[in-house]
Image (tube, helix red, strand yellow):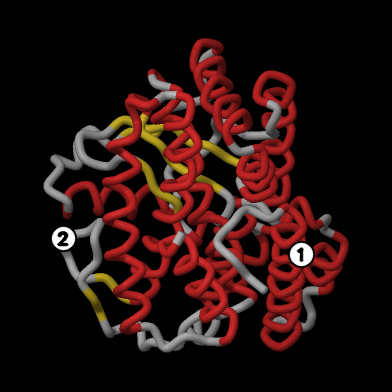
Amino acid sequence: MRTWAPDAEASQLDRAALIQVTRSSLLEVVEQAAPERQDVLRALREASDVHLFHPDFFEWYFAVRDRVGEEDEAGFARELDRLEQVLAVVQRSLERAATHQAALQVALDLGGVQETVTVQRANRSAQDMGGSGTRFRVLPEASPQRVEQIAAGLALLQELWPEAHTELAQSVQQLTLFEDDTLKSFADFQRHGSIFMRVDFLKDPVILADYLFHEGSHVRLNTVLSVSPMFLNPSDAVYETPLRGDPRPMFGAFHQMFVLVRIHELYQRLSRRRPEYAEKVVELRSKLESGWQVVREHAQLTESGEAMVSSIGQVLRA
């Protein structure tokens, strides 16, 4: 049964299932649209799971999928031609992550993201949220001082909740720091496995642990939803939620509920050691109750979704 709690075995199984779906989907697309591209088919079959479960590969995957049905054979061919380059970019990212593993206890790439579709969309979001859109800037590879700060946040997460730390290590391959006057942090399924965070948050290990786990939980749930749908609501149906002023589709409401129950538990664990965070626990529980109620009342749940929502209900009844 699926629950909200971090589970290393379930995380690995869902990751493997998503890799299989991604590989099979791409092979089917290429075999149907460009069967002569045996080089691409061979590369997809031979690529390691580690290379396929990576933000740069997922971004290429969506670019290829977006070309399907556009009747743009030249554009589709150009995307296929990029596969070798994309796999090389992934390899460099994995090598950068390996250099940080000893310090972080997690293999995280802390640089390398440039002008991607995700970054462009984040810039637009900053403006839509009332920011100037002029300060949004992705930072390059983290300095040694910032690596130390990230290590402190990860160490606190591991100390408070080892299972959460393990899940983060399994789910997230890349942490990109940015500057902005509006956005705080985000994850985007088009760069699945990557999380983005405002550099200000590195100064406080508690805030950093919070946002690392927060965004890592979005990545985790995106993996789950890719292999096991939890609700059947139409995407154009929207609902009021506790964390956003604008109505959100069920996808956003479900994500809020999932992240809130986890961050609530994280601060509960923290408050047992540092009582000054007790008020934060009360605040999060109130938001969790509201978020859970939205999903409970409006979600057209699948069997997996019902199990998830029920497990969160048990937290609220405790």
Does the image show residue 20? yes
Which residue is labeled 1 in the image? 13
> Splitting the image into 4 quarters, where does residue 10 fall?
bottom right
**What amino acid type should be assigned to the residue bearing mark 2?**
Gly
Residue at position x 17%, y 65% in the image: 246
Residue at position x 54%, y 72% in the image: 308
> Splitting the image into 4 quarters, where does residue 307 fall?
bottom right
**What amino acid type should be assigned to the residue bearing mark 1?**
Leu
Please provide percent x and percent y for residue 312: 48, 65
Figure check: 245 above or below 91: below
Confirm or deny contact between disc 2 and disc 1 (CB under 8 A): no
Most extreme residue toward the top is 145
Figure check: 260 above or below 274: below
Which residue is labeled 2 in the image? 245
Q: Is residue 309 left or right of residue 21?
A: left
Does the image show residue 114? no
Figure check: 270 above or below 18: above
- Closer to the chain start, of discs 2 and 1, is 1
Q: Quadrant of the N terminus?
A: bottom right
Q: Is residue 143 left or right of residue 1?
A: left
Please provide percent x and percent y for residue 289: 32, 63
Please provide percent x and percent y for residue 288: 34, 59
Q: Nearer the viewer, residue 72 or 189?
A: 189
